[in-house]
Amino acid sequence: MSELDTDKLSDCLQGFDHPVSTNLFFGHHSTISKVEGALKGGRFHHAWLFAGPHGIGKASFAYHLARVLIGSDKQRLESSEGLLALSEMIRNEKAGRLISQFAHPDMRVLRRAYDEKGKKFFRFIRVDEVRALKNFLHTTPSMGPQRVVIVDAAEDMNGPSANALLKVLEEPPAHTNFILISHSPGQIPITIRSRCRLLKFNALNSDDFEAAVRQQFEGEGRAMPEDVNWQNLGHLANGSVRLGVELITGGGLKFYQALYKIFDHLPSLDERNVDFFVTGVLRDKSGQDYESGMQLIFDLINRLIKGRVAAYSLSVNEQKLGDKLIKTEAIEQWLGLWDTLQQQTRDVEELNLDKRTHLMSCFFSLRDIVRAG
């Protein structure tokens, strides 16, 4: 288990190691090869955009790459067994130990900061934190050949902070590499995206997904539950290790079963399962189960819509559910509902509104859209 205090780091799943501490890395072989080729070929872009679903290894790989950029050089990479192997060697050196504690003078990480007064994370990466890079970038690297700036996640910037970063990317300082991590690259201004080399990360396959989830539990010395249904878990998590861990630790699989039954009973409201779902996800005071519960709702709606309008693979039960609930002529209304519920959820968080009321409102909205046909 890492000694790093992660409770106030927005880019870490509470109770588990931060991606900087992840040693084993699963999947993404072609993606790694592209980066190694750029490093060895002298064509390494100053800014990279790591894009893909949340929780599939983008941040973990960003820190593997940062260790190599900061603590190594082209010659050492060519003589090693590859980028990941070299990263693990550097992890045990002075540079690697400093990076693991976010104490290396040649690395900066931009993330949503923790609001000590409000006891929660700020909604955006604040512009002052981006502007604070100025002094850092106007110096030369102090311990190695390169500096690294990691932004996790890039879509967490608002207009002012994005503009401040754009000014830096337009005239990049020498010996500086930017790694922008994004789960929704479409939310990032095109002016920033156009100045980065895009690197796409795809969802992990079932074997890599299971191995990575197990590693998360082993890294924390936790016992992996013996009754995990890996087929159901992989289907719900869609290859996201983070979501898979959240589903296991938060009882998400049980919540999904209740949610499926709620949808299956629509337009009637299954009061017993509604109460189980709402009470269950609100019981966790950290808010993690509530966030996971809302994500289950969004993801189920999203999958059912895609199953109706595209060649998207669903489980047999969800295929039947989509055929039953979503009529072809009502697809636009369902898309509108999906957008509305997400915006309402953001408003609940920002305005500190009642979460139970919001959850019940979600189910009432689902009832009404099915009634309307």
Image: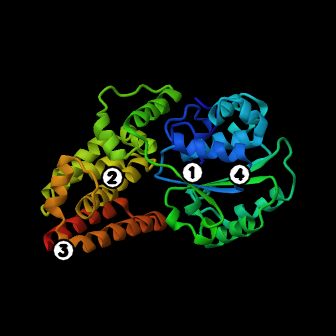
Please tell me whether residue 33 is drawn above or below residue 76 in the rendered image. below
Task: List the residue tagged with mark 4.
Answer: 44
Question: Which residue: 73% across, 70% down?
Answer: 167
**Front tag of 1 and 4:** 4
Marks 1 and 4 in Cβ contact (< 8 Å): no
CA distance separating discs 2 and 4: 39 Å
* Dot label at residue 10: 1
Q: Quadrant of residue 367?
A: bottom left
Residue 251 at what x, y percent from top left?
A: 33, 40
Residue 117 location, quadrant = bottom right
Image side of residue 198 versus residue 327, left or right: right
Q: Quadrant of residue 204?
A: top left
Q: Position of residue 212 (x, y in %)?
A: 46, 34
Q: Label 1 sits on what residue type?
A: Ser
- Mark 4 lies on a secondary structure that is loop
Query: What residue sits 61% from the left and 72% below the top?
Result: 159
Q: Earlier in the sequence, mark 1 or mark 2?
A: 1
The residue that appears at 40% across and 40% down in the rendered structure is 205
Q: Earlier in the sequence, mark 3 or mark 2?
A: 2
Tell me the number on the disc at residue 329: 3
Residue 15 visible, this angle: yes
